[in-house]
Amino acid sequence: MKNYNRKKSSKKLFQGIINFSNKRDPIVECDKINHVIKLSNNIVNFLHGDLVEFEILNRKRKGFYTANIISLVKRNKEEYVGIIQINKNFAFTIIDDRKIHSDIFIPSNNIGDAQDGDKVLIKILEWKKQDLSPIGKVEKVLGKPGEHETEMDSILSQNNINLSFPIDVLEQTKKISEEISDEEIKKRRDFRNELTFTIDPVDAKDFDDALSFKKIDEDNYEIGIHIADVSHYVKSGTILDKEAYTRATSIYLVDRVIPMLPEKLSNKVCSLRPQEEKLTFSTCITINKNGDIKEHWFGRTVIKSNYRFSYSEAQEIIETKKNKISKENSLTGKQYAVGDEVVEAILVMDEIAKKSRKNREKIGSINFNKKEVYFKLDEKNNPVGVFIKESKDANKLIEEFMLIANRKVAELFTEIKKQKYIYRIHDLPDNEKLKSLKHIVKSFGYTLDLTSSKGISKSINKLLNQIHGKEEQNLIESLALRSMSKAEYSTNNIGHYGLAFVNYTHFTSPIRRYPDILVHRLLQDILDKIYGKMDKNLQKKAIHCSEQENNAVKAERESIKFMQIKFMQNKIGETFSGIISGVSDWGIYVELEKNKCEGMVYVKDIKDDKYYYSNEDASLIGKKTKKKYQLGDTITVEVKNADLIKKHLDFIII
C-alpha cells in the first residue's frame, strides 16, 4: 500500500501498530522494542490498529520512549460500523468502536438509502493529509440501533464475517454425493464393527470426532480417535476450498452458528452421525490404564458410530457407573438400549483421561477450568435465562483424547523433516502481566512462583486448584488467562507453553477449523511419501487462519456482551452481589456473581467521596475517607442503566 505523509529521516526506522486504547495518550506497539513508545507528533490521519513506520526520538526515562510517525504502511481496516447522522448536504458516521477517535465524513452522493440514525457499514475511501476526518461511503444499511438483528448483523459486519455462502459454492456442494462407494471403503481401514460413539453438546449438529474402543487384555486397550474426513470432500483449489479458507473457522454467536462449510457438509455428509457409515481420518493408539501409549497408527478409515451421547449423558454414566440411557436410531426412529459394553468403555477411557491429565500437569501443562456463560433464548431470541457451564469429566475425557491425537500428529511432523508443517504454538507468558497477577493474587492470600517457566506453570496449576469453587475463581482464572500469550498457527514450531507440549497441532476439528484440513492434507502427503507440494504460502495461510480465529473470538464475545445487556434491561433498580473485575481511573468494572454479567460503576457515581486511581495497587481510593475499591473486592450494586446501543451496563454502589 502507498505510504502516506512520508518524511525524510536519517534515523533507524521501525514498524509498529498504533494503539488508541487511551485516546489521550496513544502508543505504538513494536515487537522489536520492549518498552512503552509514546507519540510526539500529530496523529491525525491514523486510526487504531494501523501499521505505521516510525523513528525513535529519545528515551526520556526508564521504560519510556518517544517516537515520531514517518508514514502509514497499511490500514488495519477499511470498513467500520457506526450510526449515521445526516445533514442537508453531507453526513457523518460515528463509529461504534470507541478506539476510533474520528468520525467518518460521508458526502451526500455516498449516503445511499441510509436514514438519519441508522446503523450502517461504511467503507473509508481516502484520508487526505489536510482533512480532519476520513471520507467514506455507506456500504450497507444494517437497521435501527438496539434492535436484535441490527446489532447481530453489526457484530458480523464489523468483524468481516459473511453470513451466507456464494451461489457457486452451494452449487458445488449440491454435487457432492452422500453415498460411499465400495471402492472407497476398500482403500480404508474398516472400523464399522468396532464399538464407536460420539460425545458432544446436547444441541450439536456437526460431530467432528468419534471414539472407538476395543479391549486387548486386562491392562491394554485399542482406542481409535476418528476425525471427519473433510479433505476427502473439500478438494484443494476448488471454490469450496477457497471459501472455507477465506472463512477459516466456524463462528458461534449466542443465537446462531455461522459455519465454515455449507450445511450439507457440516451437519450431514461430514458429521459423524449415529448409525451412519462415515469416512474418517484416524489416529489409533494402543494405551494402558496409566495413559502410556505403546503403539500408534495414522490412516484413512470408515466408521459407523453406534451411539451419540451428550456430555450430560456421558457424565451420568461416569458418576453413577451405570447405564440408564436409551437412544433413538437416527435412521429408523426406533428406541434401542445402550449396551453395557459402552458403559465399560466410557469408564475405562475416563480413568485413562484422568491419568493422562495428571501426567500433563507433572510436566507443566496448565489446566484452566473457566466457567462459560450460556443463555436460554425464547422463540424471538430474547434471553430469558443465564446459566453457567463448567467443564466436567465427560468434557475432559474428550479433550484428553483429542490432545493425544493432535500431539501424535505433530510429533510425526517433527520427525519427518522433509517439508513445512502447520503447528499450534503458544509462546511464554508476558512477564509484566505475570508480575501484576502475582501482586493481585497476593491480596487474596495466594502466591505465585515466577523464578522459572516450569515453576510458573506448576505455580499457576496450584493456584487454579486452590481457587476452585471459591467466589474469586472466575476472576483469577480470567486474569491468569490474560497473562498468557495468544495461541496461534505457524510453520515455526516453538512448542505450546500452556500444554507443555514440544509438538502440537490441530487435527481434530476439520468441520469447523481450516488449519485442521491443511493438517489432514499434510499428514496424507507423509503417508503417500509426497513432500513439499504444500510448502508455498503455508505460513501465509497460518497467519490468515490465526487472524480469522481472533475475529471469531471477538465476534463471539461481542454477542455475549450484547445478550448480557439485553438480559439486564428489565433488571433496572434491582440489586446484585458482584466482584470487582477491573479498576481504571474512570471507574470500576463489576462482574455479578449470579449471572457473570459485567458492568461499570463510574467514579462520578460514587458520591461518598472524591476518588483517585492508584496505579500501585490498581485501586480507587477516597481522598478524605481513604476508602479503597480494588480488584477482587465483593460489593453490592444496583443496576442503573442497560444501553443496547452504546453496549453499556451501568451500576451504582449500594
Image: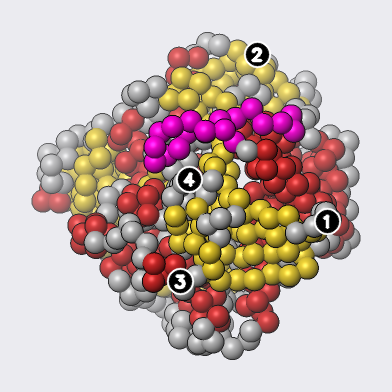
Residue to which mark 3 is pinned: 186
Residue 516 seen: no
Q: Residue at x 48, y 59 (%)?
A: 228
Q: CA separation, marks 2 and 3?
A: 71 Å
* Pointer 2 or 3: first along the chain: 3
Q: Secondary structure at mark 3?
A: helix
* Numbered badge on residue 654: 2
For residue 284, the mark is none
Q: What residue type is disc 1 on?
A: Asp
Residue 285, how many percent across, how many down?
A: 69, 64
Circle nearer the N terminus (4, 3): 3
Q: Which mark is residue 219?
A: 1
Residue lying at the far top in this picture: please name it: 573
Q: Is residue 269 left or right of residue 9?
A: left
x and y, in percent, of residue 227 in the image = 53, 59
Q: Which residue is mark 4?
A: 274
What secondary structure prevails in the magenta region? loop
Q: Which residues are magenta?
A: 319-338
Q: Quadrant of residue 596?
A: top right
